[in-house]
Image: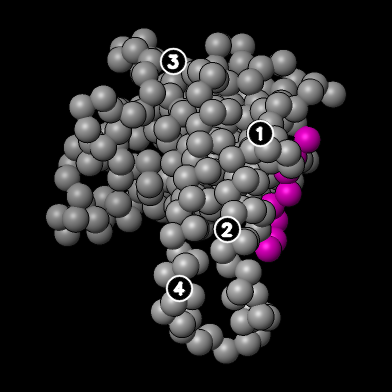
Amino acid sequence: MMPVRQSNRDKDSVVAVLEKVRMKVMDHCSTNKKTPGDAYTPPDRADFTKEEPWRIFRIMAEFVDAFELLSSHYNLVAVFGSARVKPETALYQDCVHFGELLTQNGYGVISGGGPGIMEAANRGAYNCHGQSVGLNIKLPMEQHPNRYQNISFDFRYFFIRKVCFVKYCVGTVIYPGGFGTMDELSEVLTLIQTRKINPIPLIFVGKAFWAPLLDWFRSTLLADGMISPEDMHLFTVVDNAEEAIEQLKEFHRKNGICLTVRSDI
């Protein structure tokens, strides 16, 4: 197994230090903590004003740790898709192949670090000794870190994790998935549409799977004037890993490779 590089949160990390300070400040509130199932009651204003500012420091610390870890890794392609896809399926195997193709063409993989499509992308990069980044998060179901990561980070906050996906990728590839996949798809599509980030290739894999959504884009969103005709050209739809890597390379040949963060805003 390749060694996994990850942020050290068990010793003197920023998160650990700030959490110790926060716990001291909040110690007097410990007797008022609720257990699961208790009815919600609004917090006392005095308690609220003590707790919320310290949460900001914990958020800041997670950003700092994540940025520090990821800033030295380049040409990462974000791969999203269902956590429920099984290794024996053709979809999983195609995504493993895509991870391999990314590494062979000078890219790395950045995924959610969980099972299914995330695991498949990491596995392909890992098999080829490439950059295999997993941005993990604890969920009540489905999510557990896959073993094909050589760079790993565990998040408390969903929104920080999402920022890191977009900040450190040079392209986004969307395999079939559920609500989480749609969330990531919509965010990247919106950021490109509103020009809040530099343009990057956004590629949907699986023409049959995405066809109903794209039909709705045309028949409802476009027909009702909710989007513009040019918005339908912000993404590309392909059928498999081979087509996806060609679209990715073609975009970068024409436009160059750059990170999403704009220097002018």
Residue numbers of the magenta segment: 140-147
Q: Earlier in the sequence, mark 2 or mark 3?
A: 2
Q: Are marks 4 and 1 in contact (CB under 8 Å)?
A: no
Residue wearing tag 3? 249
State the CA–CA distance, disc 4 to disc 1. Answer: 30 Å
Residue for badge 2: 22
Where is residue 110 drawn, in percent x and y?
57, 31
Q: Report helix, strand or loop for mark 3.
A: helix
Q: Nearer the viewer, mark 3 or mark 1?
A: 1
| Real-space Cα separation, disc 2 to disc 3, in angstroms | 47 Å
Circle 3 crowding by C-alpha within 10 Å: few under 14, some 14–19, many from 20 = some
Query: Which quadrant of the figure has residue 130?
Result: top right
Labels 3 & 1 near each other (Cβ < 8 A): no
The quarter in which the C terminus is drawn is top left
Residue 208 appears at what percent x and percent y?
49, 44
Give the Cα distance between marks 2 and 1.
20 Å
Q: Residues within 10 Å of mark 1 (few under 14, many from 20)?
A: some
**Amino acid bearing label 2:** Arg
The mark closer to the camera, 4 or 1, is: 4
